[in-house]
């Protein structure tokens, strides 16, 4: 059998932040529940273990998450 040896390369992890993904999760939870957490915690922090990112949402961020979307 033939054996191939490849030049070693460093392992890299390039998973860009995706705050819109987290905003979609918050929208799926529902505005009432998200605002209840915000009222008790003062902010919402979400840790995405898969991508190794932490997202922080304050009141202004949550207002933007639940801002009505327009077609224009």
Image (cartoon, grey):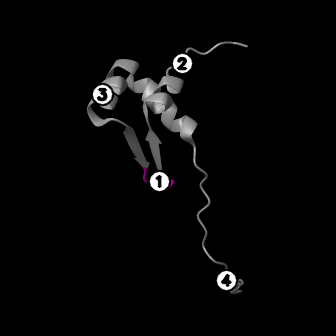
* Number of other residues with Cα within 10 Å of mark 3, as a class: few under 14, some 14 to 19, many 20 or more: few
Which residue of the protein is positioned furthest toward the left in this rendering? 40
Please report whichever mark, 1 or 3, sits nearer to the chain's N-terminal start: 3
- Is the C-beta separation of discs 1 and 3 under 8 Å? no
Which SS class for mark 4?
loop
The quadrant of the image that shows the N terminus is bottom right
Up-down: is 7 above or below 60?
below
SS assignment for the magenta stretch, majority: loop
Picture coordinates of residue 66, whole percent (x, y): 49, 21
Q: Seen in the image, is 70 located left or right of residue 43?
A: right
Q: Which residue is mark 4?
A: 8
Kindly state the secondary structure of the residue where label 2 is placed. loop
Q: Quadrant of the rendered structure where residue 15 is?
A: bottom right
Q: Earlier in the sequence, mark 3 or mark 2?
A: 3
The picture places residue 9, in percent across and down from the top left corner, at 67, 79
In-image side of 36 versus 49 (left or right) = left
**What is the CA distance from the residue labelled 4 to the residue labelled 2?**
49 Å
From this view, report whether residue 51 is shown above or below residue 34. Answer: below
**Residue at disc 1, secondary structure:** loop
Region in magenta: 48-53
Using the numbered discs, state the Cα–Cα distance from disc 3 to disc 2 in whole angstroms.
18 Å
Which is in the foreground here, disc 4 or disc 2? 2
Q: Residues within 10 Å of mark 1 (few under 14, many from 20)?
A: few
Residue that numbered label 3 is attached to: 39
Q: Earlier in the sequence, mark 4 or mark 1?
A: 4
- Residue 67: which disc? 2
Q: Is residue 51 above or below residue 5?
A: above
């Amino acid at each position: 059998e033939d054996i191939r040896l490849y030049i070693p390369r460093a392992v890299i992890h390039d998973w860009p932040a995706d705050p819109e993904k987290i905003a979609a999760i918050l929208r799926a939870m529902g505005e009432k529940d998200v605002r209840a957490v915000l009222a008790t915690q003062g902010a919402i922090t979400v840790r995405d273990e898969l991508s190794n990112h932490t997202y922080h949402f304050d009141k202004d961020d949550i207002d933007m998450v639940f801002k009505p979307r327009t077609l224009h």
